[in-house]
Amino acid sequence: MPFTGQSHVRIARPSRDLAAAERFWADGLGLTVLFRAEAGRAPGTHDLLMVGHPDASWHLELVHGGDHPVEPRPTDEDLLVLYLDGPVPEETVERLLAHGGTQIPSSNPYWNEWGVTVEDPDGYRLVLCRRGRSPRCTRWPWPAG
């Protein structure tokens, strides 16, 4: 089957602390824990947490440990952008901050104008954008929404 707009996407990242990541992504943002694996340190295994929405075509995979643990190395441009197509709910931002997030200004002024940027416990950035994004939109920049 070819890759299409309906293909499922997994975004995989290393994590220092899966419990802290779960608090941020599940309790803070409201994603569902889709899968969890605790390796027990068997050779060739690692701890794993997958979060997302059960009916979505994407999910976030967070990995910790294993034979060769990887330290997260996010940059200012490692962004996960959620297009909300409306105002960023203050209660969502407050919940993210209460569950381990840090609100920061984005290094790109575009995201400061159109949304709120919150760093997760591993330093990766989540942008809650008040703009919308139509899958059929081919113009850049996208029309204001």
Image (cartoon, rainbow, N blue to C red):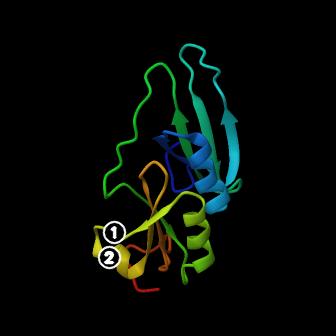
| Residue 24 seen in render | yes
In the image, residue 95 above or below residue 91: above
On the image, numbered disc 1 is attached to which residue? 106
Position in image of residue 51 (x %, y %): 63, 49
In the image, residue 67 above or below residue 3: above
* Drawn side of residue 107 relative to residue 97, left or right: left
Q: Cβ–Cβ below 8 Å for labels 2 and 1?
A: yes
- Residue at 49% across, 79% down: 130
In the image, residue 15 above or below residue 116: above
Describe the element under mark 1 as helix, strand or loop: loop
Corner quadrant of residue 125: bottom left
Disc 2 residue crowd, few under 14, some 14–19, many 20+, Cα 10 Å: few
Please count the marks in the image. Answer: 2
Residue type at tag 1: Ser
- Residue at 55% across, 65% down: 97
On the image, numbered disc 2 is attached to which residue? 110
Position in image of residue 17 (x %, y %): 54, 40
Describe the element under mark 2 as helix, strand or loop: helix
Kindly identify which numbered label has been placed on residue 133: none
Q: What is the CA distance from the residue labelled 2 to the residue labelled 1? A: 8 Å
